[in-house]
């Protein structure tokens, strides 16, 4: 793979945030789809929870440029720039991160890896998580951030190659005991594909939550803060209720399964001791 991060940092040094916005580092394009680089390479080898999205978006790109510019001005080394992009930028932002933390806390997912709450995952617990994307480059379709189904992703050779090389191949770097949570139906389909091909064990898939970037009532409905009767007649969430309910039930079952397995393992250790 080309050393995109060096060119990315060089453009920010020369032109700042505006410079990289005007001349992003293009990884590939095919006329309809374009992939632009943002730092994503950092890995936490001991990660026990993997949060999988589909692709970074425009907000991510802006936050990555601002974070990288700040770190370059502070003369931070490359490894720090990569780590801080993963910690502060990926699944970050004023809407995404709070919604994500609320959903993780709702199911008490952080407790499965010994963390007290979701906010700790990006602070003292950061080494225990690994954010990843099926397409780690900012991927757009006719200028809009790609939000198509998984079938579309694998049908486009350029996107399929990025998925296989930058997501599937990198799963080998993650602990085989790690748990996986998908953010959105496309990410969930990508994880099920990995399980179907034997790249992941099915037991590692905890479940799916909606994309936390969604504004409006979807996250609130998913978290049971509002009911169907509270939705306005033209709220698009009404057309998503079936899969949101199924996803909520599956997440509850996945967390319960892991809690039961941990309790059984602890009981076995006590009996042996």
Image (cartoon, rainbow, N blue to C red):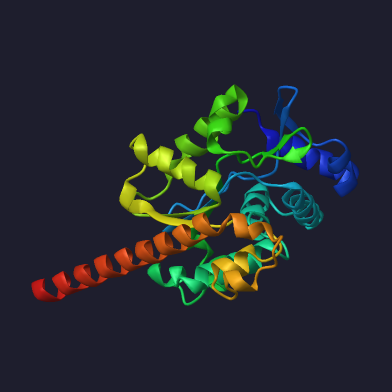
The answer, for residue 167, to whether it is visible in the render is yes
Residue 6 is drawn in which quadrant? top right
The residue sitting at 31% across, 69% down in the picture is 259
Quarter of the figure with the C terminus:
bottom left
Quarter of the figure with the N terminus:
top right
Asked whether 175 or 188 is in front, the reply is 188
Image coords of residue 3 (percent x, y) = 66, 32
Asked whether 13 or 132 is in front, the reply is 132
User: Extreme front residue here?
Assistant: 233
The residue sitting at 79% across, 57% down in the picture is 70
Image coords of residue 9 (percent x, y) = 77, 42
The residue sitting at 88% across, 42% down in the picture is 19
The answer, for residue 124, to whether it is visible in the render is no
Q: How many marks?
A: 0
Residue 161 is drawn in which quadrant? top right
77 over 241 or under it: above or below: above
Asked whether 51 or 232 is in front, the reply is 232
208 over 201 or under it: above or below: below
Residue 23 is drawn in which quadrant? top right
Asked whether 29 or 89 is in front, the reply is 29
User: Extreme left residue here?
Assistant: 272
Image coords of residue 34 (percent x, y) = 73, 31
Left or right position of 246 against 200:
right
Image coords of residue 174 (percent x, y) = 42, 48
The residue sitting at 53% across, 63% down in the picture is 126
């Amino acid at each position: 793979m080309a050393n995109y991060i060096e060119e990315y940092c060089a453009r920010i040094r020369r032109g700042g945030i505006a410079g990289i916005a005007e001349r992003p580092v293009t990884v590939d394009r095919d006329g309809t789809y374009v992939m632009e680089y943002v730092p994503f390479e950092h890995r936490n080898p001991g990660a026990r929870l993997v949060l999988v999205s589909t692709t970074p978006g425009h907000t991510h790109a802006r936050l990555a440029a601002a974070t990288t510019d700040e770190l370059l001005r502070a003369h931070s080394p490359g490894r720090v720039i990569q780590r801080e992009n993963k910690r502060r930028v990926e699944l970050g932002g004023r809407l995404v991160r709070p919604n994500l933390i609320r959903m993780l806390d709702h199911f008490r997912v952080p407790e499965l890896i010994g963390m007290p709450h979701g906010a700790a995952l990006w602070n003292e617990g950061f080494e225990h998580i690994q954010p990843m994307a099926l397409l780690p480059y900012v991927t757009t379709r006719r200028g809009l951030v790609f939000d198509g189904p998984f079938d579309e992703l694998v049908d486009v050779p350029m996107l399929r190659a990025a998925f296989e090389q930058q997501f599937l191949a990198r799963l080998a770097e993650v602990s085989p005991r790690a748990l996986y949570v998908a953010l959105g139906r496309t990410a969930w389909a990508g994880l099920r594909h990995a399980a179907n091909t034997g790249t992941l064990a099915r037991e590692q898939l905890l479940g799916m939550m909606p994309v936390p970037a969604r504004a409006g009532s979807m996250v609130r409905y998913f978290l049971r803060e509002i009911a169907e009767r509270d939705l306005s007649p033209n709220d698009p969430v009404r057309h998503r209720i079936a899969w949101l309910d199924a996803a909520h039930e599956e997440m509850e079952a996945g967390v319960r399964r892991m809690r039961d397995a941990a309790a059984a393992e602890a009981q076995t250790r006590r009996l042996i001791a």
